[in-house]
Amino acid sequence: MRTVTKSSKLANVCYDIRGPVLDKARQMEEEGQKIIKLNIGNIAAFGLMPPDEIVQDMIRNLPDAAGYTDSKGLFAPRKAVVHYCQEKGIRGVAVDDVYLGNGASELIVMALNAMLDNGDEVLLPAPDYPLYTAAVALSGGNPVHYVCDESSDWFPDIADIKAKITPRTKAIVVINPNNPTGALYPESLLREIVALARQHQLIILADEIYDKTLYDGQVHTSIAALSDDVLTLTFNGLSKNYRSCGYRAGWMVVSGDKRHALDYITGLNMLASMRLCANTPGQLAIQTALGGYQSIKDLVAPGGRLARQRDLAYELLTQIPGVSVVKPKAALYMFPRLDPKIYPIEDDQQFAYELLAEEKVLIVQGTGFNWKSPDHFRLVFLPNTDDLRDAVGRIERFLGTYRKR
Ligand code: PLP
């Protein structure tokens, strides 16, 4: 029998958030062990349910939502996205510029598949949300990582971006608010990125899926609102701001000067048609969500559940010797640093594996986010404060034994 191997297109594709350490966790759970999962931003799994209005509308819409829709999506939810763009100051967006997807993930992969020829380069943040690196590689492109600077609130290093632009650079990915660092970028920095994109004719891929998950009264600026000319694809959806990852409801908006991108847009339309359409109940939820007043506001306001959990996780982690953390301004994650002088980790996947085996706490190692040195990990602060205390206590105990090795 011929051995069945995976396609060579997958040679450089990796997605460690759901990688080998998770397989081990699954096995431990099957054996009856209880794992504390700090590995994934699955909000509803922590009892943070979607707004009731969305759930009720989903139930009501279900009997009439069994058919395919137009491949870009239903008119009304796309119109709701157009209004959302207007609220955020993104100009010149019509219904035809909006694509609905089974989560933003599907549209991110689609946008890169339609864009890249073999060897084309895409600038991506390091650390990144690894779907981007994987999708660039799967599309035949070369992921080129620019550094986000931990000593500067994890902001993208503009000099590093400039140094990495080549004649083959086609696009730059900006994840703001950021996963895994929790950074929120100021307008001045976004303007610098827009200027570089304009100068080098780069497409901007703007991931804004956490744009309402903001702490301390922060305000989010959409990078697409800062230019009328630079071609920008903005990704967003209900997964995080509306706590409904499982409804798989996301959107992509094409803005900027589209006159020079008609061929690319034809490619996007073709890929959208090939997958027929996004799930119809999820599309209908978009309309309800964006039209309503409910989102994640109360949870992130001072004293709200997510704000309290962020504060607690930060306080507990920074008390551990050799652990430092930039306090997140947004999103659901922290990306703590383990001082290599105190924790000489050589293989951070092994580190995550041992933490899981010894303390039953599941995190994701920093290299899973294309961070080069094995000295960081990502943690989600979604568990309630009691569970967080327990989890960080276990991490502290594990690190204590690690120091003595
Ligand atoms: N973009 C970022 C930065 C994310 O963190 C995630 C999920 O964690 C996604 C996109 C995926 O979103 P969706 O559930 O809409 O596919």
Image (tube, rainbow, N blue to C red):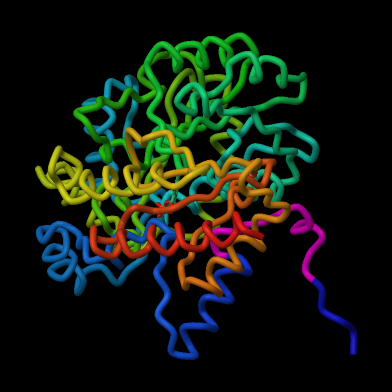
Residue 96, position as x, y percentages in the image: 37, 36
Residue 270 in view of the camera: no
Residue 388 placement, left or right of 102: left
Check the image and report above or below for 72 versus 36. above
Query: Looking at the figure, which quarter contains the C terminus?
Result: bottom right
Q: Quadrant of residue 268?
A: top right
Q: Is residue 258 magenta?
A: no
User: Total number of numbered labels?
Assistant: 0
Task: Provide residue 4's location: percent of width, then percent of height.
Answer: 82, 79
**Residue plotted at (29% across, 51% down):** 238
Q: The magenta stretch spans which residues?
A: 6-18
Residue 13 painted magenta: yes
Residue at the location (29% across, 65% down)? 387
Please name whichever residue, 127 or 349, is drawn nearer the observer in this view of the structure: 349
Residue 333 shows up from this direction: yes
The N terminus is located in which quarter?
bottom right
Tell me: 262 left or right of 185: right
Front-lying residue, 135 or 364: 364
Residue under the point 40% across and 23% down: 185
Residue at 47% over, 14% down: 229
**Foreground of the two, 60 or 64:** 60
Specify the quadrant of the image occupied by residue 124.
top right
Q: Is residue 236 left or right of residue 268?
A: left
